[in-house]
Amino acid sequence: MCTTCGCGGGEAKLDGQPHSHPHPLDHSALRPGRRRISLEQSLLAKNDALAALNRQAFLERGILALNLVSSPGSGKTTLLEQTILRLRDRVPVVVIEGDQQTSHDADRIRAAGAPAVQINTGKGCHLDAHMVGHALESLSPAEGAVLMIENVGNLVCPAAFDLGEAHKVVILSVTEGEDKPLKYPDMFAAADLMLLNKVDLLPYLRFDVDRCLAFARRINPGIQILHVSAQTGEGMEAWLAWIEAGRRLAMTVRKTAAS
Amino acid sequence: MHELSLMEGMVQGIQEEALRRGFTRVHQVRLEVGRLAGVEVEALRFAFGPTTEGTVLEGALLEILELPGQGLCQACGQTVEVEARFDLCPVCGEGFVALTSGTEMRVKDLDVD
Ligand SMILES: Nc1nc2c(ncn2[C@@H]2O[C@H](COP(=O)(O)OP(=O)(O)OP(=O)(O)O)[C@@H](O)[C@H]2O)c(=O)[nH]1
Ligand SMILES: [Mg+2]
Ligand SMILES: [Zn+2]
């Protein structure tokens, strides 16, 4: 049961189980009188507060958390499978899978050798910090672990919801067209790294890589870009090196915070 | 449809305010939503009824004030209105526009009892 968020529930399910919370309202502490209250509170304030709690937990345990976002079918799960196969002997990797329905992706991750929790968002089009907080309770990643969060396939809504991650990683596959960064700018603006996936298919497509990268940098001049193929393994070394650098940083920051 | 979860977050935040500040009923809530916030105002209105049921917000009036997208052109220095978040300056056609308003989505104030 949730001790931090006091939320009303919703239809999100963790590994198929519904979850619930106590009602937070205490009617005993009330003062009367009609009045106007100025709030100036973001509609995302609740999510952002819960994301900050997740981020604090990651910091204390030296965990590198990545939020993988893309349109459906860009290759997120395949990329995760291939990443786990290459990392699992050196680095503890755990995964949170977000999909509207089914546990297919979590099953694939477990088969690749990493613990995974499946969140089904029902009608929800994105993961939020609250769902991730609950998934963490059952995953309890080890100190120094890498936590990969595969968000719901959607290039719009996940951009707005901070989960507490260190970085958003946007995956764009070459079959989607080179103008995606311009059509869905918020997501490319929010990401620190872009993985251009399925580059093994480039010989069969009319896809102008330079144009695509220029579009991405127009929206986000500081974005890092790596070319990969989750199918052939091309470019995986650079991606793994990027993860390991992030993980070393997370572990170093934890040590300095603790001392 | 992330307007639904935005509304759920808003309701939770206001429920907590009710506890903190001691009110049991909200008569009116005013939101400020920027045109570049990526939020559909109609979808917010649609989500308001179901998400406020059984809360201090039940039956409250929802007023949404829309704010224009505005910013400062980094090339010509003019304050301009923009239609989309990453549009180039509509005056000089060259500069990026550093936004000064248009991306907000917040509760401005509440009339409570
Ligand atoms: N040729 C090629 N195919 C790929 C590559 N990566 C993934 N695929 C294929 O793309 C399809 C979708 O891959 P997934 O990994 O399920 O994609 P996803 O992003 O997890 O999809 P959702 O979770 O449904 O959004 C599968 O048929 C993969 O085999 C790649 O690098 N090259
Ligand atoms: Mg997947
Ligand atoms: Zn200008």
Image (cartoon, coloured by chain):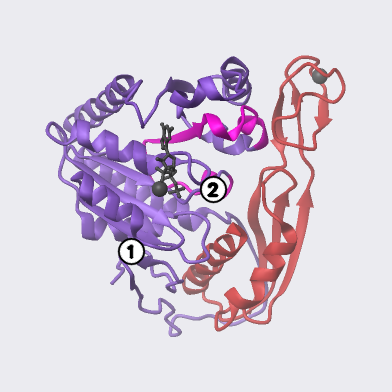
Chain colours: A purple, B red
Q: Quadrant of residue A107?
A: bottom left
- Tell me the amino acid under the disc marked 2: Asn
Residue A4 versus residue B84 in the image, above or below: below
Residue drawn where x is 52% and y is 73% of the image: B18
> Residue A225: horizontal and vertical position, in percent?
46, 21
In 3D space, how far apart are the residues under numbered discs 2 and 1 (Cα atoms)? 28 Å
Q: Earlier in the sequence, mark 2 or mark 1?
A: 1
Q: Which residues are magenta?
A: A156-183
Residue A106 versus residue B68 in the image, above or below: below
> Residue A248: horizontal and vertical position, in percent?
22, 26
Asked whether residue A178 is in view, the answer is yes
A144 vs A195, left or right, is left
- Tell me the amino acid under the disc marked 1: Thr
Quick check: which quadrant has ligand 1?
top left
Q: To which residue does mark 1 refer?
A: A4
B3 or A149, nearer to the observer: A149
Queried whether the magenta region covers residue A162, the answer comes back as yes
Residue B31 versus residue A69 in the image, above or below: below
Q: To which residue does mark 2 refer?
A: A154
A185 vs A125, left or right, is right
Residue farthest front in this picture: A204
Residue drawn where x is 40% and y is 79% of the image: A23
Q: Quadrant of residue A20?
A: bottom left
- For label 2, count other residues whose C-alpha is less than 10 Å away and answer few (under 14), some (14-19) or many (20+): some
Q: Which type of secondary structure does the marked residue at label 1 adopt?
A: loop
> Residue B91: horizontal and vertical position, in percent?
87, 22
> Residue A186: horizontal and vertical position, in percent?
60, 38
Q: Is mark 1 within 8 Å of ligand 2?
A: no
B34 or A222, nearer to the observer: A222
B32 vs A110, left or right, is right
Residue drawn where x is 57% and y is 79% of the image: B56
Of the 4 image quadrants, the one containing the N terminus of chain B is bottom right
